[in-house]
Image (cartoon, rainbow, N blue to C red):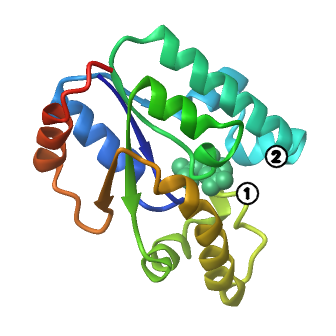
């Protein structure tokens, strides 16, 4: 089984991903960390040096490469991953996608202290954060909502999600 966790920055994809992997007894991968290991640079440093278009190209390549190289896994992806290069089509075809849904308000409260690590948010003032997140989330929701499974990001129940994934009967 290949499970892809998708959702906006701050929705808890990495935390849930590693718990879900343990529950399903599968290896866990974090796409951002795969990119950082591959480039030897942090995501903010890569954005600053090479720009977003190069990041998106590498992100799409690393997503495909790691999907093909591993038989079964839980992978948390970046907030923007589903919205570029038909990555969402790839994930939906190759495995099971899970969207961690969360309201803009909840995301703002989670991201206000962690925005320096996120190149798309780091330049925003506190007042600019909520309108930016609301508008970007609205654009991205179109992609997120095509996931096979949509769950509430605020209080995800790991065991119940694992059971749902197993009972979905996918051989992917
Ligand atoms: C991004 C989200 C980040 C990272 C990059 C771009 C985005 O990952 O991939 O900063 O476009 O939403 P997280 O969702 O893990 O913060």
Could you say where residue 138 lies in the image, as x and y percent from the top left? 60, 71
* Front-lying residue, 38 or 140: 140
The answer to whether residue 30 shows anywhere in this view is no
Q: Is mark 1 within 8 Å of ligand 1?
A: yes
* Front-lying residue, 146 or 40: 146
Looking at the image, residue 77 lies above or below residue 39: below
**Mark 1 or mark 2, which is nearer to you?**
2
Could you say where residue 104 lies in the image, as x and y percent from the top left? 50, 78
* Front-lying residue, 140 or 75: 140
Q: Is mark 2 within 8 Å of ligand 1?
A: yes
* Front-lying residue, 3 or 109: 3
Q: Secondary structure at mark 1?
A: loop
Tell me the residue that label 1 is attached to. Answer: 119
Could you say where residue 109 lies in the image, as x and y percent from the top left? 47, 79
Looking at the image, residue 12 lies above or below residue 155: above
Q: Residue at x 30, y 38 (%)?
A: 18
Left or right of 46 on screen, residue 16: left
**Res. 43 image quadrant:** top right
The answer to whether residue 96 shows anywhere in this view is yes
Label 2 near label 1: C-beta < 8 Å? yes
Tell me the residue that label 2 is attached to. Answer: 52
Could you say where residue 146 lies in the image, as x and y percent from the top left? 47, 50
């Amino acid at each position: 089984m290949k499970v892809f966790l998708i959702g906006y920055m701050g929705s808890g994809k990495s935390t849930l991903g590693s718990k879900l992997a343990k529950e399903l007894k599968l290896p866990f991968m974090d796409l951002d960390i795969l990119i950082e290991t591959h480039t030897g640079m942090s995501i903010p440093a890569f954005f600053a040096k090479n720009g977003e278009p190069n990041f998106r190209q590498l992100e799409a390549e690393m997503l495909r490469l790691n999907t093909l190289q591993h038989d079964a896994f839980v992978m948390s992806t970046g907030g923007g991953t589903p919205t570029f290069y038909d990555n969402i089509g790839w994930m939906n075809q190759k495995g099971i996608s899970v969207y961690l849904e969360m309201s803009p308000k909840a995301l703002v409260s989670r991201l206000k202290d962690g925005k320096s690590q996120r190149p798309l948010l780091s330049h925003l003032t506190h007042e600019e954060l909520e309108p930016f997140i609301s508008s970007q989330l609205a654009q991205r929701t179109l992609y997120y909502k095509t996931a096979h499974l949509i769950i509430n990001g605020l209080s995800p129940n790991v065991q119940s999600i694992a059971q749902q994934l197993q009972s979905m009967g996918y051989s992917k």
